[in-house]
Amino acid sequence: MERDAKLIIITNGKDADGFATERKKEIPVFVNEKSATRTEFYEALRSNIKIRTVFEMRQEDWELSAHIVDGKKEYASQIEYDGAVCDIVRTFKNDKSMIEIICS
């Protein structure tokens, strides 16, 4: 069942006076919540990373978060789902149209 979520892009910059600023952009998307596999969960724990959940979404929705930082293409670093904000650890393209987002 698809549910509402928001991809979060955080960019750092400087204001007119040279002070550091942080800008946050939210992109609404639809996701399916999945369980992390046992192997992935325990492998992450070995690296001191706790996998909270896995989301699946359309590749086109993920591409909406693409932006350029220092000449390199980057994507959202966080996702908000059901009132909680999770850090995106990695992504996995599981077929031509869907992508899995692994979150801690």
Image (cartoon, grey):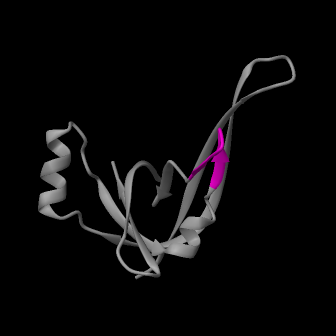
- Residue at image location 57% in from the left, 74% down from the top: 60
Q: Position of residue 18 (x, y in %)?
A: 80, 17
In the depicted structure, whether residue 87 falls above or below residue 53: above
- Residue at image location 46% in from the left, 60% down from the top: 81
Left or right relative to 83: residue 51: left
Please name whichever residue, 81 or 46, is drawn nearer the observer in this view of the structure: 46
Specify the farthest residue to the right.
16
In the depicted structure, whether residue 102 falls above or below residue 78: below
State the extent of the magenta-drawn residues as a range.
Answer: 67-74
- Residue at image location 12% in from the left, 59% down from the top: 39
Left or right relative to 1: residue 65: right
Left or right relative to 76: residue 81: left
Q: Quadrant of the N terminus?
A: bottom left
Q: Position of residue 58 (x, y in %)?
A: 50, 76
- Residue at image location 50% in from the left, 48% down from the top: 77
Please name whichever residue, 7 or 69, is drawn nearer the observer in this view of the structure: 69
In this rendering, the count of numbered labels is 0
In the depicted structure, whether residue 77 falls above or below residue 95: above
Q: Position of residue 66 (x, y in %)?
A: 62, 58
Q: Position of residue 98 (x, y in %)?
A: 43, 77
Q: Does residue 41 show up magenta in the picture?
A: no
In the depicted structure, whether residue 90 falls above or below residue 70: below
Task: Considering the whole magenta stretch, tell me its main secondary structure.
Answer: strand
